[in-house]
Amino acid sequence: MTSHQTRTRTLVEWALSLSYDTLPADVINRTKDFFVDTLACAVAGRDHIAVTAMLEYAKTMGPADGKCEVIGFSDVRTSPAFAALVNGASAHVVEQDDLHNSSVMHPATIIYPTALAVAQDVGASGKEFITACVVGYEFACRAGEYLGKAHYEKFHTTATTGVLGAAATTAYLLRLNADQFVSAIGTAGTQAAGLWQFLLDATHSKQVHTGQACATGVFSAYTSASGLLGTADILEGSRGMGAALGNLDPTPSAIDGDLGKKWSVLESSFKWHASCRHTHPSADALLALLKEDGVKYTDIASITAYTYKAAIDVLGLSGEGKTVHQSKFSMGFVLAVAAKKGSAGLMDFTEADLVDPELRELQGKVNMVLDDDINKEFPARWLGRVVVETKDGRTLTRSVDVVKGDPGWTLTREEIESKALALAKYGHVQDIPAFKDAVQRIWNLESQDKIEKYSFA
Amino acid sequence: MTSHQTRTRTLVEWALSLSYDTLPADVINRTKDFFVDTLACAVAGRDHIAVTAMLEYAKTMGPADGKCEVIGFSDVRTSPAFAALVNGASAHVVEQDDLHNSSVMHPATIIYPTALAVAQDVGASGKEFITACVVGYEFACRAGEYLGKAHYEKFHTTATTGVLGAAATTAYLLRLNADQFVSAIGTAGTQAAGLWQFLLDATHSKQVHTGQACATGVFSAYTSASGLLGTADILEGSRGMGAALGNLDPTPSAIDGDLGKKWSVLESSFKWHASCRHTHPSADALLALLKEDGVKYTDIASITAYTYKAAIDVLGLSGEGKTVHQSKFSMGFVLAVAAKKGSAGLMDFTEADLVDPELRELQGKVNMVLDDDINKEFPARWLGRVVVETKDGRTLTRSVDVVKGDPGWTLTREEIESKALALAKYGHVQDIPAFKDAVQRIWNLESQDKIEKYSFA
């Protein structure tokens, strides 16, 4: 393997120079915030068939007595690859995990499951865990920024660059040297995968992508530790990700620009609504409009949601939304839910709602329209504007440029705890005090010598 | 999931209609031939660092007491996912496994490791094993034909369509119903991955691709059996493999044309030379020319190898060939070896050869040139022509259109056994009689109620 100074290698060397003591306080705090958020997402998703199928797989293929937990299944102990697999799936399935705008990917559902699994395997401390997550965010998000929106048109970036984040998190926790770390990134990137076809028929590939990105990242770093060589320049090489995965106009400086000045974890957003993040600007605009202008959902004649191309591309695949999960990818259905219920939270999307004639009628009144100005800003900014026509002839407009949960309007710890508790209840957690205790332990993560078990019944 | 009659579903339903008794005798025999060939390739590759790193991973992440063997490691018993992973890597690393022309992929290194692992897990019979392999070949090769050479420019097709073959082989052995089988194909295809960047720096991704294609195929079928849904039209869907993986002009009829009339396993070639298959037409032409025209390697002033674009694209990445594996991807080095040694077999590529000044000098006299007529025929036919200029001023030309090992010039059972034995010796098999016995058991595979262990020390 060459030790040619690629941008990937620069990023690796910077990552290896990091330690907990070098991290800014807000980076540390936000890293813990998203850990709480992710743990709660995983519990909320634990009973989904995509998750239980992968758990069954873990039991069939893995050991029965591993060191790693599967969140929400306190009787299961498996190896890091399988723990990362199942937790990476469960943390993503209720669509409440975080979103990093400029990379168009969801880092938390990849980074935390991987870090938890590997930390429990190697006996890492809370400080090492936090640093490894910060490292993972940088690889996943910077690679997503590098590949850009042309890549996202064809590939599920959360998986394709998530696998680099998972490999980096693992590499950091395994204390790989720079050559091994670069190898791990190469091995991960050559396995980058994830297509959008599943959106068309409401199947479970979204969770497969996240779970497998975690497991493949783990694979890449552990095998690098054993001497397997990965290619040195998987991002920028002439046959690498930038060249092959889409018709790209990649942004090389994203890989190693502003190291230590911009932090991906600080740029990531909490999801407040429980739907695809592409619906949030429109949902927020609509909720504000209805409230401030005193419009009831029964007054609405039509809703036009002005948005960017990627939203139309992705949301346009989901049709009317046949399942609860798919309905969260229908702009019409999400805006109908928001209008009728006044919110679009986890409890607002149910099987019963799928057959509610009022919601389906309202959904039919929603149109998405491409707006050039909004599109130009994407993915740096995720903007939205809605125009509502009322049955009595009024035309009302509202725009948003920051949605609740964004870095510019982030959640307080009270709001994070409240969201987490709602997720835990959605996941039928019986022992709520134990869940609350787990959250408190995360707030004090840096004081722990070893990452202990978080699972609860 | 929709039960819409896609071509994928047609292929699935046809596969489920197959049984051993419906297979033509030549299909059965060739399937056993390639099993012997693959078993021997795996033994030959067992000590490569890429393989031992993955074996280490299997031990760390998998169970210690599984039902499945790792070929050449008689003390290891693991679960099917890990057995398929390691055997899928070892069977590919010495570059002696089979090649299916029109799909531009190596099916055997995917299909047999997967079939062996799953058959040992479920206790399948020899007849079921054979049929499952035939099924796997059809999925892997037909998908490769569908995606075509534009896909191959960016992706390692052995992995990207191999994963479909692995999923199909597993699905057949698990006796999935049609809906589950279609799901398995969808889950496998959305994870299709494998880039060429590793060729540039002689790293180990080629073996990662094949091993992981096996493991991911296993994952896809086992999770489908547990209820995980994969998308119904991953090949032809608007966001599927044909649309996203390259700038393609796919051939839909390849997916379900001539079912039961053409058999992929009969279209596949044995590798006689131990180098990248793209070098074989030129190597055969050169060997014939030198022999028939009485030219010695020391007489050569220059060699021009006229070939197709894909050969230039792939072989052009390997530079001079820094490692034994990479040297097999240098047209110049392979032709130099063939010219000097009179053959380009497994024993003809060594560490010592990498520093042989005669070989390096001769390598420098070789040029590859694109030939439009040859390129037009690719990948249906892999043709080659060499022009040799001698130091005494002669210009000699030789073309080949069928190389040794191709379906039109296939190996006899004696030649297969002889090649297998050479591979076993290369892999330092101590108990040669036990290896020979394993080969005999494969010749009688259909008589076995259960696939037993093949490993030997």
Image: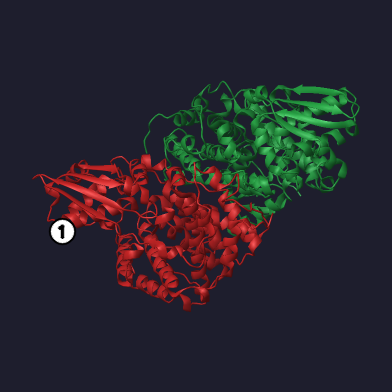
Chain colours: A green, B red
Give coordinates of residue B156: x percent, y percent: 44, 48
Total of numbered circles in the picture? Answer: 1
B404 w.r.t. A100: above or below = below
Q: Residue furthest left?
A: B392
Which residue is denoted by mark 1 in the rendering? B292
Q: Is residue A409 left or right of residue A394?
A: left
Q: Is residue A444 visible?
A: no
Residue at 43% over, 63% down? B71
Nearest the camera: B374 or A453? Answer: B374
Give coordinates of residue B244: x percent, y percent: 54, 43
Considering the image in quadrants, where does the N terminus of chain B appear?
bottom right
Q: Is residue A369 left or right of residue A363?
A: left
Nearest the camera: B117 or A325? Answer: A325
Q: Amino acid at mark 1?
A: Glu
Considering the image in quadrants, where does the C terminus of chain B appear?
bottom left
Nearest the camera: B324 or B427? Answer: B324
Give coordinates of residue A90: x percent, y percent: 68, 46
Q: Is residue B70 left or right of residue A141?
A: left
Q: Is residue A101 left or right of residue B99?
A: right
Give coordinates of residue A427: x percent, y percent: 78, 46
Q: Disc 1 on helix, strand or loop?
A: helix
B374 w.r.t. B258: above or below = above
Q: The disc numbered 1 marks a residue on which chain?
A: B
B265 w.r.t. A356: above or below = below
Nearest the camera: A242 or A19? Answer: A242
Q: Is residue B88 visible?
A: yes
Assess disc 1: are there few (<14), some (14-19) or many (≥20) residues with their C-alpha within 10 Å of its C-alpha: few
